[in-house]
Image (cartoon, grey):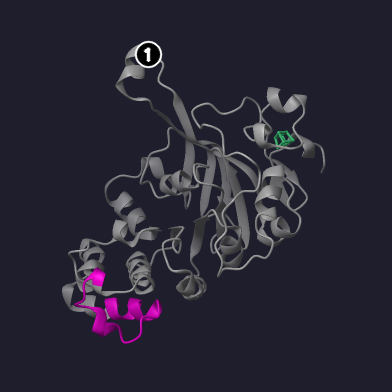
Amino acid sequence: SAPLISIEDARLHYKVGGALSALRGNPPVVKAVDGVTFTIRRGESVGLLGESGCGKTSMGRLLLKLEEATGGAIRFDGEKIADLRGQALKRYRSRAQFIFQNPFDAINPRFTIRQTLSEPLENAGVPSAEREARIVSVLELVRLPEPRQYLDRYPHQLSGGQLQRVVMARALILEPDFVVADEPVSMLDVSVRAGVLNVFRDVRDRLGLTAIYISHDLALVRYVCERTIVMYLGKVMEDGPTEDIVHEPLHPYTKALVAAVPVPDPNQSHDALPIGRGAPDPRNPPSGCVFRDRCPHAFDRCGREVPELRQTGTRQVACHLFEGAD
Ligand code: SF4
């Protein structure tokens, strides 16, 4: 069947450096997303994995049209999202939702939980008489026990885990087809993470949602996603079934990520990466393969040519070592 989402050569390039370098006429350009191509089937769960600055959050924001791509095309259900206007855009905004990392990005601290959850219903034209029942049922869905007791509380009266469930409830209340969750448990205490992740997995399966889960942590991605896309400096390095990537990573960058997580466990947090220095300055990435200056296998060609993403067995890999392997 046709994919629900197709991304073709998506780019998000922007100039940085402030007024002075703009006056000089040569502001540096950051390629936050640089030629990303992949498709997502309906009902699929895909992890976007990488260190901070790899472009995974920018990619999520492009998908939800929170930011406009500077090149390429993103299609949702066959329609280019860049062309959506008016009612069509409004419909897209209810079908595709973002679950924020920081609950306070999604929730106004001065609104009660009832107000927070009423707002999207009101915007979507749901009659006021029906709203309370919808709110209670979505809070039950995210497993907040006895939901009515929370309706008139303010965000600061809830624990972190309860609040992240409210954020999820807000994203789900309009019954979307597609959600992008950006590190949704990274601000939570380790002891409540697994509970929130279980709710996320359970709700996704019950509603048949298509989901993207953004994280720097392979253990968490493994816990929630059947497929993983590894990004580095705005590009896809490897894309394939999560278990294959965990058991036999192919790209040298993925190998380093996997080596950083000896025992994948959602109750532990892991910081990438064991390879020496941090990622290079995104304003000035290496020529050829962007991973070159951290790669233990780099050879001449890596500095001259950008490796293309190619099918290699069950996945796609962007590395000169795997060219012609399949
Ligand atoms: Fe390393 Fe070269 Fe492969 Fe890049 S293309 S990951 S530098 S071997």
Q: What residue is pinned by disc 1?
A: 25
Q: Position of residue 79 (x, y in %)?
A: 44, 47
In the figure, residue 132 lies in which quadrant?
Answer: bottom left
Dot 1: few (<14), some (14–19), or many (≥20) neighbours within 10 Å?
few
- On the rendered structure, is 297 left or right of 191? right
Q: Give the quadrant of ligand 1.
A: top right
Examine the rendered structure and indicate whether residue 24 appears above or below residue 183. Answer: above
Q: Position of residue 70 (x, y in %)?
A: 43, 32
Q: Which residues are magenta?
A: 134-156
Identified at 56% across, 66% down, the residue is 268
Whether residue 79 is visible, yes or no, is: no
- In the image, 89 versus 45, the foreground residue is 45
Identified at 67% across, 32% down, the residue is 292
Examine the rendered structure and indicate whether residue 306 appears above or below residue 196. Answer: above
Residue type highlighted by circle 1: Gly
- In the image, 186 versus 35, the foreground residue is 186
Provide the secondary structure element on which disc 1 rests: loop
Q: Is residue 147 magenta?
A: yes
- On the rendered structure, is 149 left or right of 309? left
Q: How would you classify the magenta stretch by its main secondary structure? A: helix
Q: Position of residue 274 (x, y in %)?
A: 65, 48
Identified at 35% across, 74% down, the residue is 162
In the figure, residue 260 lies in which quadrant?
Answer: bottom right
For the C terminus, the quadrant is top right
- On the rendered structure, is 242 left or right of 204? right
